[in-house]
Amino acid sequence: MTAKTSLGIGPEEMASRSALGIDTEELASCVSCGLCLPHCPTFRVTGEEWASPRGRISAMRQVQDHGMAVDESFLASMDSCVQCRGCEPACPSGVPFGSMMEATQAELARRRRVDWRRWGFRVLGHRWLLNQLSRSLAVVQRLRLVPSKRLGLPKIPLVQERLRATGNDVWLFTGCVMDAWQRSTHASAKRVVEAAGAGVALPGPGAACCGALSLHAGLEDHAHALAARTMKALEGSVPILVDSAGCGAVLKEYGKHLGTPEAVAFSERVMDVHEWLAAQADQLPSVGERGQDVTVAIHDPCHLRHVQRAHQSVADVLSRYATVVTLDDEGLCCGAGGAYAAMQPELAASIRDRKLEAINRSGADIVASANPGCTIHLANAGVDVRHPLEIVDEAIDYDG
């Protein structure tokens, strides 16, 4: 099994620069112990050193410290990484693999002559344009003119529920793709938060995208510009609740990425919506007639578990409304990885196959996952998967 590489870097340009811009101390912190290997999804499905965190860090050292050329094998190693960061909590030395990968991808993005992501991701920051394109795609899907399953696309709604602000106790971050394709999840999250007693404010178009996908692709300038817009659109001091694990992870790291006191203060206000709800557990309504006696297996999104370290709050909230079971591969990636499933479909499918085996062994009726990429990727394999707060919303007794 091999990884696809991003094209458009000429041989002369590959060899023209050696530095990747990685912090020297960070690069030296890996002692190559290998404890990360069982937690790396690409190593687990390939068994190859180049597809492991240890192998990738070794390749980074060869380029940065020893002048090795950035060749196709280096690109394949870097581009095959899901950036799940499952290696970080497993590492006894605390190696910050995520920041090293982000620095490497930023350098590669500067070298690439052709990269559709540079232009495609710009759409994400323009809510009106993204919504219009999504509606057009929804029509094309109904006409069966696009192979949605092969491209990893969900069934995009033709009509979206309109969300309305009900107060200013908390912000609900709505973002880009999730708002265009899965706004019903935002609606569920909003109702549950309101049921806990809070008035919900909704951001304007300035907060149309958090910049996570651009950051993972190495498009630092674009990611930072989106971050500045988002911070301006969500001014104030009230909590910022996020129902997408990937978005929440990058919003919580604005302080690290932008390096300003304003960004640090902003990140301190960000909470995964389940974190906030777990703290308001006594205010949550009981199970109503609409509630279902269902068994739910929780698949923790990587960026909720490994980056935010806030995954337990999902079980704390959901267990009030359903029987929750733990997958026996708890903590392992499903292979979604934002745009990864589209860029590396073979590897993404192989990683997902392992997750499907764990789901089947669980005997659960439904799978819950708090990230749009995970739900789309698993649903395309036939899994009945929903956001945790959709399950909670359906179970709550709003009239009690």
Image (cartoon, rainbow, N blue to C red):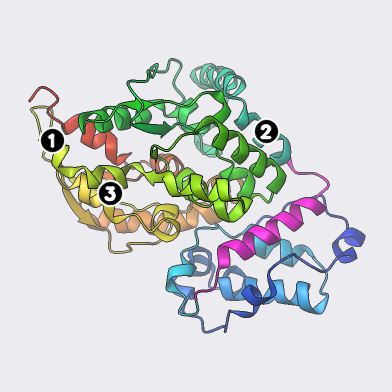
Which class describes the residues within 10 Å of circle 1: few (<14), some (14-19), or many (20+)?
A: some
| Cα–Cα gap, marks 1 and 3 | 18 Å
Which secondary structure, mark 3? helix
Q: Residue at x 23, y 47 (%)?
A: 279
- What amino acid type should be assigned to the residue bearing mark 2? Arg
Per the image, the residue denoted by label 1 is 292
- What amino acid type should be assigned to the residue bearing mark 3? Val
Indicate whether 134 appears above or below 236: above
Q: From the viewer's side, name the closer residue of 170 and 65.
A: 170
The boundaries of the magenta stretch are 94-115
Per the image, the residue denoted by label 3 is 314
| Cα–Cα gap, marks 2 and 1 | 41 Å
Residue 208 visible somewhere in the drawing: no
Residue 23 visible somewhere in the drawing: yes
Tell me the chief SS of the magenta region. Answer: helix
- What amino acid type should be assigned to the residue bearing mark 1? Gln
Q: From the viewer's side, name the closer residue of 184 and 11.
A: 184
Quadrant into which the C terminus falls: top left
Indicate whether 253 appears above or below 2: above
Let me know if residue 369 is in the magenta part.
no
Which secondary structure, mark 1? loop
Image location (x, y in percent) of residue 350: 48, 57
Q: Earlier in the sequence, mark 3 or mark 2?
A: 2
